[in-house]
Image: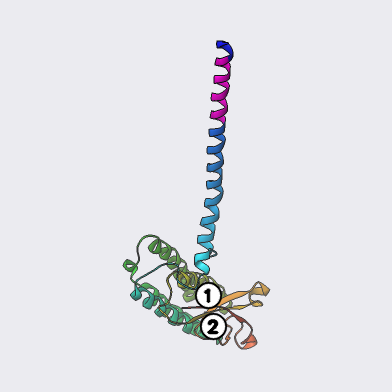
Amino acid sequence: MKTKSLFFSMLLAVTAFTFLQCGGNKKEETQAEQAPATEQEHASGSSAAAEAAEPLFAVHAQFQQQLAGVFKSYVTLKEALVSADASTVSPAATATLVSVENIEMKLLTGAAHNDWMNYKAGIESSLKAMVASTDIEEQRQSFSTLTDNLYKSIKAYGLGGVQAYYEFCPMAFDNQGGFWLSDAAEIRNPYFGDKMLTCGEVREKLK
């Protein structure tokens, strides 16, 4: 009887250990599966917070004003592309670059600061490429990347009430499509200019 009792005790201990191990592994697997999805959503701006009308971060009003200044310079740059004159694009890109460099990073802390550093690096890289190029199509390619990072910045921090429109042309870049930002709902396509000035639509309103 003692042998049988000892056997059942050992069996129960092994069963309990196995259950705990499976439960722990399942929890770890769930966390491992969820973590990449969360990071991907944060990077792409596709999370519920990024899609909301309100900015992702609560930031200093002065930072929003400075970001609105970048947006204003960006709109001038966009109009230079609409005119399809590469000689006017470079000075407009330089002015936008100055606006970006004037933003006070100390106004942001924590995750807001870290994200801005990533957006800022992308924005500056695109602008410097536009300054260096004299080819309008190359400038438009860089402008598309610039738009992506500025759009994410505006979604994250807001413009302090300044209205912006996120617009899209499905025919840009050999029908791959291209986005841009504007201060008006009126479509003035920076990827085609006079060739197809009004090709596009408003996809989102930001402020």
Image quadrant of residue 114? Answer: bottom left
- Within-10-Å neighbours for mark 1: few <14, some 14–19, many 20+: many
Residue 7 point in image, percent of width and height = 58, 16
Q: Amino acid at mark 2?
A: Leu
Q: Is residue 11 left or right of residue 54?
A: right
Q: Position of residue 173 (x, y in %)?
A: 64, 74
Please name the residue that numbered disc 1 is placed on: 143
C-alpha span from label 1 to label 2: 9 Å
Please state if 35 lies on the left or on the right of 69 as rendered. right
Q: In the image, which disc is placed on residue 161?
A: none
User: On screen, 92 above or below 3?
Assistant: below
- The magenta span reads 5-18
Secondary structure of the residue carrying numbered label 2 = helix
Q: Are marks 1 and 2 in contact (CB under 8 Å)?
A: yes
Residue 29 vertical placement versus 115 (above, below):
above
The front one of 26 and 10 is 10
Q: Nearer the viewer, residue 55 or 139?
A: 55
Q: Residue at x 51, y 56 (%)?
A: 39
Q: Which mark is residue 81?
A: 2
Instruction: Look at the magenta stretch and give its main secondary structure.
Output: helix
In the image, residue 150 lies in the stretch drawn in magenta: no
Residue 80: image location, x then y, percent: 51, 85
Secondary structure, mark 1, is helix
- Give, as a three-letter code, the residue at label 1: Phe
Q: Along the line of sight, which residue is nearer the eye, 81 or 171?
A: 171
Residue drawn 47% across the image and 67% down it: 122
Please rate how many residues cluster around mark 2, counting C-alpha atoms within 10 Å: few if below 14, some from 14 to 19, many from 20. many
